[in-house]
Amino acid sequence: MLLLKGNLINLRDWALSDLPDFTKWMQPEHEWHKYDGPYYPSATPEEVDLIAARRREMILNNSFPSPRRSLAIVDASTDKLIGMVSWYWQGEETNWISVGICIYDPAFWNKGRGYEALGLWSEYLLTASPTLARLDLRTWSGNLRMMRLAEKLGYLQEACFRKARIVNGDYYDGMGYGILREEWQERYPNGFAACLHGSFLRGL
């Protein structure tokens, strides 16, 4: 099992025990859906069941891809699922990907868990995929937490597509952030995890 350890959270491969919570949090009434691409249609119950079934099959067959396409974010103390990280292609022909993160439970928002999760995920992808020259992150101007998180980790705002998203009848800007491999390495010369654990130890 792939396991990336933080202070507050861990990133790990999906487990069968995650699937009930995953299915629950994917239901459209939960608040996180208001911020994570709300301009896209919500997954139908049938689509959620299909995603969970595919994940179950991958777990049972231990057929996780390398590099991983997603990892579960779990509480470091309880190992309970609280979110996920993922990536998708922006341009496969030039090894250009975008990263994604979601913390499902609002009780865990604004407490540093997203910072740890996205930092560990960014580090993993750059390490596991030597051909990557950069990482992208896409969001919208209504998701201030995601914009602040990107900037805190060192991602630079590279694009602002004005009035490109419509949420509840209002226009918002589409926001594009990115960081180059060499910029990440300069910011975290010993790796993000070392920086993270070092800051934790200094606080003891």
Image (cartoon, helix red, strand yellow):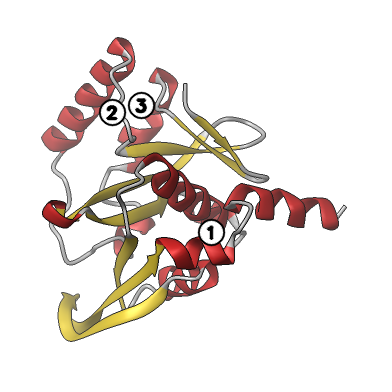
Tell me what residue is drawn at x 31 percent, y 80 percent.
Answer: 158
| Residue bearing the label numbered 1 | 109
Would you place residue 174 above or below residue 192 in this image?
Answer: below
Please tell me which of labels 2 and 1 falls first in the chain.
2
| Residue 85 in the image, given as x and y percentages of width and height | 39, 46
Q: Dot 3: few (<14), some (14–19), or many (≥20) neighbours within 10 Å?
A: some
Tell me what residue is drawn at x 30 percent, y 69 percent.
Answer: 139
Q: Secondary structure at mark 3?
A: helix
Is residue 187 visible in the rendered image? The answer is yes
Quick one: which residue is furthest to the bottom in this view?
162
| Residue bearing the label numbered 2 | 65
Q: Viewer-proximal residue, 46 or 52?
A: 52
Q: Secondary structure at mark 2?
A: loop
- Going by the numbered disc 3, the residue's amino acid type is Leu
Q: Which mark is residue 25?
A: none
From mark 3 to mark 2, how far is it between C-alphas? 18 Å
Would you place residue 153 above or below residue 175 in this image?
Answer: above
For this view, does 149 lie left or right of residue 195? left
From mark 2 to mark 1, how far is it between C-alphas? 29 Å
For this view, does 137 lie left or right of residue 201? left
